Image (cartoon, grey):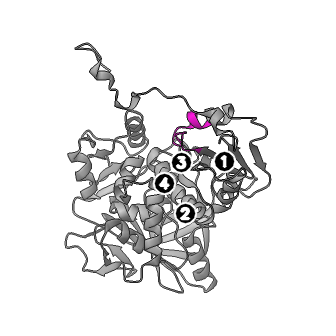
Amino acid sequence: MRAWLDKLAEAGELLAVSREVDPRFELAAVTQRAQEAGNRPVLFENVRGSRLRVATNLFADGARLREIVGGADEPFAAAYAKVLDAAEARVDSPQTAVRAPEDLRQGALSDLPLITYHEHDAGPYFTAAIALALDPDTGAPNLSFHRAMYVGPGELRLRLGDSHDLADYQRRAEQAGRELPVALLIGVPAPVFLAAGTHLPPGVNEYALAAELAGKPVEAYPSRHTMLPVPVAAEVVVEGRILPGERRPEGPFGEVLGYYVPEGLNHVMEVDGVAYRRDAIFHSLLCGSREDLALLEAVNAARVYRDLSRRLPGIVDVSCAPAFMNTTVQIRPQYASHARDVMDVVFDSHADYNQLCCVVEEDVNLHDMNAVIHAFITRGRVDARTRVVAGRAGFYRDKEDDFAGRVGLDATRPFGREAEFVSKKVPGLDATRLEDYLARGSRI
């Protein structure tokens, strides 16, 4: 992560905050203002109550994620889908065993920045913590994001959900009457961060994806208490065990959808040790912000693109912006029901997401929802091109069917009548720069 921060600083993107900042609300407020003012990353150099610096908003736009993935000559979703294929097909070890870093220091949870983000949050949370655990049966490492509520010096409470791999690992360990060793990684290299936000098939070593993104194996060492393979570049490592048969109150917390998740009984992590690098940098993520959503949008778009391109022809690109629960697919229409078939695949691609699917053609910018809705409204009868699927299960945490159902919008031109809907263009527009025409001193 330090290399990533250095790169952002050299590009003039990094904002440095030197004045003391209160971790209770103030840090989150400054983060949100920075996002509103241009989405630049922020490094807080003086956080009250901790010696650690705090970095935030590091992965808050598609351009930064594109830089991690590569493949600039093709759509992001297609480029990332190729990386996923390569990671799943990898047969060599994606990890290289090394010794623990020499500057690693042992400490306590109270040494870390204890950040409270929202007005009604139950307390401080670790929001960018990546849970590292091993499949109890195969031993394959898994990386996943799970919020962790700070309760005291030896206890965190985790929300695992029901559909995550870590929840499955814990369930199997609990059925066997065993604790599940886990390490929380905070402040990791960009490829590990992106890999942790991507769901791979069960049994796949998720360091394989990080290795594909980085172009080299992940250097990892056995951690002190759990012996889990921890990336040598991780800034902070919190080790412990998820207790079997134990659930305690956690929440409320302001989650990704922009609302509070109410208090509930969730899993308990008993902390055995905390280690951090000299001059460690703590990663803070404002849930529901662009740093949170950009990752979810990118990962889901790649997954949907891969599912579509394996089953249907004419798939050009996929976007899940501006909200990760909607999906816009750009196609080159092949037949009259092409858009409807696209919707079928999209709705089946992920049980939690893809609540809304819009299908457009190549003349519509799928990243611009204004253009998408304009195409839908102007290219035929909206009632005939709206599809409602009732009763389909929704977001995994849904208890009241609030997210059930799907809606599809066909914003393509009527098949066979494309000549009647040719988008207007101004010749020479692409080569025209406004600044070349303005009087000296005029500002854009």
Label 3 Cα neighbours within 10 Å, binned few <14 / some 14-19 / many ≥20: many
Query: Was residue 362 drawn as part of the magenta stretch in this picture?
Result: yes
Name which of mark 1 and mark 2 comes first in the sequence: 2
- Check disc 1 and report the residue beneath it: 356
Q: Amino acid at mark 4?
A: Ala
- Name the residue that disc number 2 marks: 306
Counting from the top left corner in percent of width and height, residue 390 is at 80, 52
Marks 4/3 in contact by CB < 8 Å: the verdict is no
Front of the two marks 4 and 2: 2
- Disc 4 is placed on an element classified as helix
Q: Earlier in the sequence, mark 3 or mark 2?
A: 3
Which residue is located at x 32 percent, y 66 percent?
Answer: 214
Select label 4 or label 3 by which is in front. Answer: 4
Pick the front one: 67 or 23:
67
Give the residue number, with chain letter if any, for mark 4: 298
Helix, strand or loop under label 1: strand
One can see residue 381 in this view:
yes
SS for dot 3? loop
Residue carrying label 3: 121
**Picture residue at 48% right of the left edge, 72% below the top:** 270
| Apparent side of residue 41 relative to residue 180 in the rendered image (left or right) | left
- Residue neighbourhood size for the residue with mark 4, other residues' Cα within 10 Å, grouped as few (<14), some (14–19), many (≥20): many
Estimate the x, y position of residue 309 in percent, counting from the top left: 57, 62
**Between 343 and 1, the one nearer to me in the picture:** 343
Q: Over which residues does the magenta segment extend?
A: 361-373
Amino acid type at circle 2 is Arg
Separation of disc 1 and disc 3 at Cα?
30 Å
> Gap in Å between the C-alphas at discs 4 and 3?
28 Å
